[in-house]
Image (cartoon, rainbow, N blue to C red):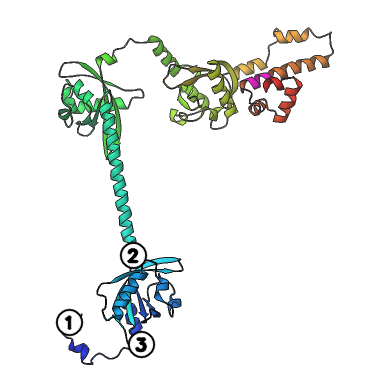
Amino acid sequence: MTTGAASFWNSGAVPLIEPEFLSSIIASASDIALVVSEQGIILSVVLESHSESFGNLKHWEGRPLVEFLTSESIPKFESSHREFLAGKVPKKALELNHSDNAVWQYPVRYTFHRFGHENAALLLGRDLRPIAETQQQLVQAQIALEQGYEARREFDARYRVLLANCTDATLFISVQSGRVIDANAVAAKLLNVSTDALIGSSFAQYFSDRSSSELTESLMNATLSEEAGHVRLRTTRGRSSLVAEPTVFRAGGQRILYCRLLSNAATTAIPDSAAADALALFRSGSDAMLFMSPKGVITAVNESFLDQVGAAHQSDVVGRSFGDFLSRGQIDLGVLIDQPQRNVQMRVYSTKLVNDLGSQVSVEISASRLEHHDTPAIGCVIRDVSRVELARSAPTPGQVPSEPSRNVMELVGSASLKDIVAETTDVVEKMCIETAVELTNNNRVAAAEMLGLSRQSLYVKLRKYGLLSKSG
């Protein structure tokens, strides 16, 4: 379409355009231009000079255009080309997908223009790949957004079901405002209000002798306690005593208190002095103590254990495998796990404790299986025996020989020294092998490593003492 000054174009004022200039004008007016003959043969390919994304398309010239179109684009081109040959220039742009030896594909929007004689058509095209990429990004963003909404709805449904079916009085309180964000029906019943009235109200208004800021501060201080902190409260309605057990977390850029409310009947229990004493012994006992799961993962330790392994905080050891701190690693851990599970208790097991710096301490460990927990656990008491070993290795003058020593002395005179030593060595060696095989539950690889022998040497000694069939 031209402006009202159409005479300018028709009066011959516009000079004829030279071929070399015409191609540059066409290239600037489009990303790709094709001159197609009446038979659909590509006569010329002109590319925009600054576009390198199409590559070299000189091999298109002299070949049918349909060879470089995808299957769904061929009928669209043939239909529009027939209309063009019939004298009807398509008014709408035609979008075609090109394919070159299936190496790459790209969409192009073409417009038809008459060009010279013999029904040749000039196709001026715009590369649609940037638009297609943008559309693809928008589609992916929309899919991700819908997936996020769906996950949010699913999470909200789970949260609502969990909150409605929770038997504990549960509330969520904003630390900043002190107001109840959400609560279940059990909490509303405990405070003698409806659920709708409870949500959005100030949490402090249901309790006496505490302002909103004081109550929030008390709950926050309770969350900082190493043990399970709690706050005792008295309601304004009914004057009943309640205990709040708070936990603080951050969500949506604000801190929120999750509170469980326990009634006086649920909190009044007969004090167990033995349990309190046991807890005090665990905390301040001189012997190292720890609890671990049936898989050997440490769940709790006392200060003495931290001293033995040179750890600064409980977080440095809790959650790690106890085998990380044993000299024989998984072999020692396997014995400490297997024996208590089979025999409830293992009284003494000698090994060495290793810290992260590589130093070792000789210890004796007793382990017990704990069955009163909902989750099974194994408790270990670890005693440092390095000083005892030093004392044993340096006997005092005039010390009375032990019973095994006296038995050996009684053989003197009845047999040669060589026979006495050989017999004593065989007895001790057999006892050690039997003990190692029993502790490792007949795991010969672990027993050989525990004794410092190769597997082949262990088999030789098992056969020597007639223990091969017994252990197998």
Give the distance between the C-alpha atoms of the residues marked 2 and 1, in whole angstroms.
32 Å
Image quadrant of residue 386? top right
Q: Position of residue 467 (x, y in %)?
A: 71, 20
Q: Is residue 54 left or right of residue 116?
A: right
Is residue 468 depicted above or below 11 in this figure?
Answer: above
The residue singled out by tag 2 in the image is 130
Q: Amino acid at mark 1?
A: Thr
Ranked by sequence position, the earlier of labels 3 and 2 is 3
Which quadrant is the C terminus positioned in?
top right
Does the magenta run of residues contain 435? yes
Q: Amino acid at mark 2?
A: Pro
The residue singled out by tag 3 in the image is 19
The residue singled out by tag 1 in the image is 3
Ranked by sequence position, the earlier of labels 1 and 3 is 1
Give the distance between the C-alpha atoms of the residues marked 3 and 2, in whole angstroms.
31 Å
Q: Main secondary structure of the magenta part?
A: helix
Q: How would you rate the neighbour count of disc 3 (Cα within 10 Å): few for under 14, some for 14-19, many for 20 or more?
A: few
Does the magenta run of residues contain 413? no
